[in-house]
Amino acid sequence: MPRYRPHVAARPSWRCRVCGAAWPCSPARLALLGEYRENRTGLLVYLATLLDEATGDLPGVDPLTDRFLTWARTR
């Protein structure tokens, strides 16, 4: 039986260690939504912190805000 590997960011590239997509990849987003199911504000604070770190690692890459925050807003 295959073991689940969490989709986490490889720094400083901010690509997923498992699938290689720009992080947060779709599986990471689903996992984060599940983990923060009852605390959307906490999720946004966590992602904003990571966005700040990624901005330092990826200068000039746009749009990091869409990549890190927009998808997690309440609809």
Image (cartoon, grey):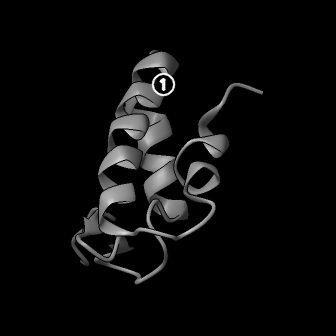
Establish if 34 lies above or below 59.
Answer: above
Front one among 30 and 68:
68
Q: Position of residue 17 (x, y in %)?
A: 28, 77
Q: Is residue 64 left or right of residue 48?
A: right
Q: Report which residue position mark 1 lands on.
A: 37
Task: Write the residue at 42% across / 36% down.
Answer: 48
Front one among 7 and 42:
42
Q: Is residue 1 left or right of residue 74?
A: left
Task: Write the residue at 29% across / 51% down.
Answer: 53
As helix, strand or loop, the secondary structure at mark 1 comes to: loop
Task: Write the residue at 21% across / 72% down.
Answer: 3
**Which three-letter amino acid code belongs to the residue tagged 1?**
Arg
Quadrant assignment for the N terminus: bottom left
Neighbor class of circle 1 (other Cα within 10 Å; few <14, some 14-19, many 20+) is few
Q: Position of residue 49 (x, y in %)?
A: 33, 37
Task: Write the residue at 55% across / 62% down.
Answer: 26
